[in-house]
Amino acid sequence: MNKPLDMTSSAIVKRAFDAEAARADFPVLARTVYGKPMHFLDTAASAQKPQAVIDAVSEAYGGDYANIHRGVYYLSQKATEAYDAARAKIAAFLNARRPEELIFTRNATEAVNLVAYSYGRKFLKEGDEVVLSEMEHHANIVPWQMLREAVGVKLTVIPISDTGELDMDAYARALKGNVKFVAMTHMSNALGTVTPIAEIIRLAHGAGAKILVDGCQMVPHEKVDLQALDADFYVFSGHKLYGPTGIGVLYGKRALLDAMPPYQTGGDMIRTVTFAKTTFAEVPARFEAGTPHIAGAIGLGAAVDYLAQFDMGEIHAHEMAVAEYARSSLQSINRVRIYGEAATRGSLVSFGLEGAHPHDIGTILDREGIAVRGGHHCAQPVMEHFGISGTVRASFGLYNTKADADALIAGVHKVMEIFG
Ligand code: ALA
């Protein structure tokens, strides 16, 4: 508790990843529910928090708390330094060119809305096409529909196959049209599909389009290198990255951000204000109107420090081993149907059980101490594709082990006994 914040995540010497040892860093995992050990399998909705993040948030309020970028006094300067340092370490973690290419938002949803509103209304016009995929989260669909209402862009949706893979031929065909923007997931939250995003970005650029990538489900699980990817915009939420809620990130290439008008206006995002005219601050301040979520940003910086102790490749290998074990165990149950069987996928398994509603399955699993999400996962078009109302989704984080997968399988057998 109350350790000084480490400002240089990249300087931390890596240590071997050990999931059992890492579990001890997450206090909530030690608790029981209904008198049973808890098996948390809903990291895709929101990850649990390591003590280091909880301490950093507590310290941000109980240590050097003051508003930022305002006071000349000690506490305000310390808080400002910690806020700015958090941006710098997240930029280093993702290999962004410069910290100011990262805008703090409330969440990934706000980040997509910011781009659709600010970039979309300035640079897209009636008849321009925006390409999406059938497996986008609602947060990467609805803001583009609002843009359609506002300026008359046309939305083109790239279908997925029954294994949950993006139809790349359809994508290439679509890019022959008047496509000016692509908004695409890096990993589907409903199916686990990992899209060939480097190729998707390359093709978008080849067609002269800009691209926004929804990285919510990818950043917590695999190494993301923003410079290597070369996406124009990349968004993710802090709470899925083991950080606090209420904080998200929009990465944008500096030249694009510089050309974009403010999304919200008010204090801290201006250079000068008179009643005749206002001039705006440089990025990132221009897109961070009002007092930001200071403790949230600092907490997200601590989450990145926590992850930076490890090699993301080792975390990924561990999570995939557990998720694939759960997947093959589920697959061997006759009445189970898996949704999402892409060749390249992440650490989640979406499934249904013949004769049982996903919510009922989730409720029975809950009584066994197993936390899963049941429903449409904010991806109704995916459910429509498969002609279902929802799935049960077990999603794995760095702290999950084979014991969690075994508990899930035992729980599914219990559901089958109940449903006969
Ligand atoms: N988008 C989050 C999920 O997939 C909330 O559960």
Image: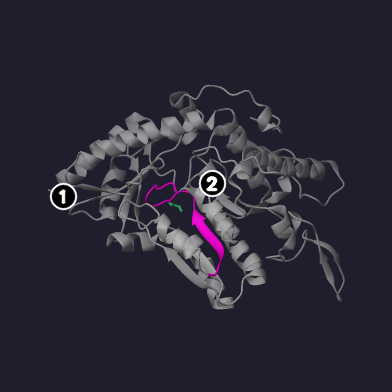
Three-letter code for the amino acid on which mark 2 is drawn: His
Three-letter code for the amino acid on which mark 1 is drawn: Phe
In the picture, the disc for residue 239 is 2
Above or below for 157 versus 70: below
Residue 272: image quadrant is: bottom right
What is the number of callouts on the image?
2
Give how far across and how far down residue 404 sits, in percent. Answer: 34, 34
| 43 or 179, nearer to the observer | 179
Q: Is residue 27 left or right of residue 2?
A: left
Q: Residues within 10 Å of mark 2 (few under 14, many from 20)?
A: many
Helix, strand or loop for the magenta stretch, by majority: loop
- Label 1, ligand 1: CB separation under 8 Å: no
Instruction: Give the residues drawn in magenta, as a range.
Output: 178-195
Q: Is residue 383 left or right of residue 3?
A: left
Q: Residues within 10 Å of mark 1 (few under 14, many from 20)?
A: few
Q: For the point 53% across and 55% down, which residue is it?
A: 203
Q: Is residue 3 left or right of residue 209?
A: right
Give how far across and how far down residue 253 sits, in percent. Answer: 68, 53
Residue 236 sits inside the magenta stretch: no
The answer for how far apart the CA atoms under marks 2 and 1 are is 35 Å
- Label 2, ligand 1: CB separation under 8 Å: no
Residue 192 sits inside the magenta stretch: yes
Give the structural element (helix, strand or loop) at label 1.
Answer: helix
- Labels 2 and 1: the sequence-earlier one: 2
Q: Which residue is mark 1?
A: 419
